[in-house]
Image (cartoon, grey):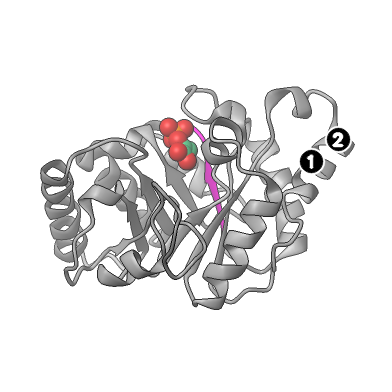
Amino acid sequence: MILCANFKANKTRQETRAYLAVVESFVSANTIDDTVIVFPPFTALERMSRNVLIGVQNAYPAQNGAYTGEITLEQLEEFGVKTILIGHSERRHVLGETQEQIAAKFRFFAQQGFVIIYCVGEPLAVREQGDEALMSYIDAQFEGIDCNYADLIIAYEPVWAIGTGLTPISQQIVEMHAALRAKTQAPLLYGGSVKVDNARSIMELDNVDGVLVGSASLSANDFCEMIAQAAELKNV
Ligand code: PEP
């Protein structure tokens, strides 16, 4: 399983240090071999050897340059970061990233050999229009994206489930993940209001290879509990 913690714009450097100390000691004490990836804010990046992967929530697709307010490859290299989240719904819908910009970002970071967690997902209004509209919306989010990229991980995150406490019913997740599986052999994560109470049953579903967790990952203990659930699933 792959378990990702997306802090969004939460936590200071000190809080992130304390959090990682808890998660890293949990991972070594329990000899966890699932992949754990934490996406802290840029200000909390540090170059340290770790038993969890550290990724960034965004970056500008350039080596360096005149991109005021952005972070580029040069800054990520300073911290040894080689993992990036691309296409998150908050970047698409709150920050207005277009598919063209997202695809350019994907191409750049794929060329640099990054592990890319590529997010797709539909707003509620699209889901309510039925399966055809739903799939053509998701298909459009793959424009310019190489589904055969070796270090690709896909996260299906319905926009209406992110930060809302709502989750799709199991059948909706299974159907979407089956459709995604037909497109790619990349691991498929589910994201959207995953928490301790529902993580296990989501990770048990067909074609679910892990979870991308926002709000509920802010508690190191809760995130460790989800890591434990993933490890237990292997033993049943
Ligand atoms: C996310 O940020 O990708 C996410 C899924 O958030 P939440 O778990 O809070 O819904």
- Judged from the image, the secondary structure of the residue bearing numbered disc 2 is helix
Whether the residues at callouts 2 and 1 have beta carbons within 8 Å, the answer is yes
Vertical arrangement, residue 205 with respect to residue 50, above or below = above
Does residue 127 appear left or right of residue 34 in this picture?
right
Give x and y (percent) for residue 225: 27, 44
| Along the viewing direction, whichever of 148 and 40 lies nearer the viewer | 40
Vertical arrangement, residue 111 with respect to residue 223, above or below = below
Does residue 197 appear left or right of residue 138 in this picture?
left
- Judged from the image, the secondary structure of the residue bearing numbered disc 1 is helix
Check the image and name the residue furthest to the right.
132
| Along the viewing direction, whichever of 109 and 155 lies nearer the viewer | 109
Give x and y (percent) for residue 114: 47, 71
Q: Mark 2 belongs to which amino acid?
A: Ala
Vertical arrangement, residue 99 with respect to residue 2, above or below = above
Residue bearing mark 2: 133
Q: Residues within 10 Å of mark 2 (few under 14, many from 20)?
A: some
Residue bearing mark 1: 137
Whether residue 110 is visible to the viewer of this picture, yes or no, is: yes
Does residue 62 appear left or right of residue 36 in this picture?
right
Does residue 98 appear left or right of residue 1 in this picture?
right
Q: Is residue 189 magenta?
A: yes
Q: Residue at x 84, y 25 (%)?
A: 129
Tell me which segment is drawn in magenta: 188-192
Q: Quadrant of residue 195?
A: top left
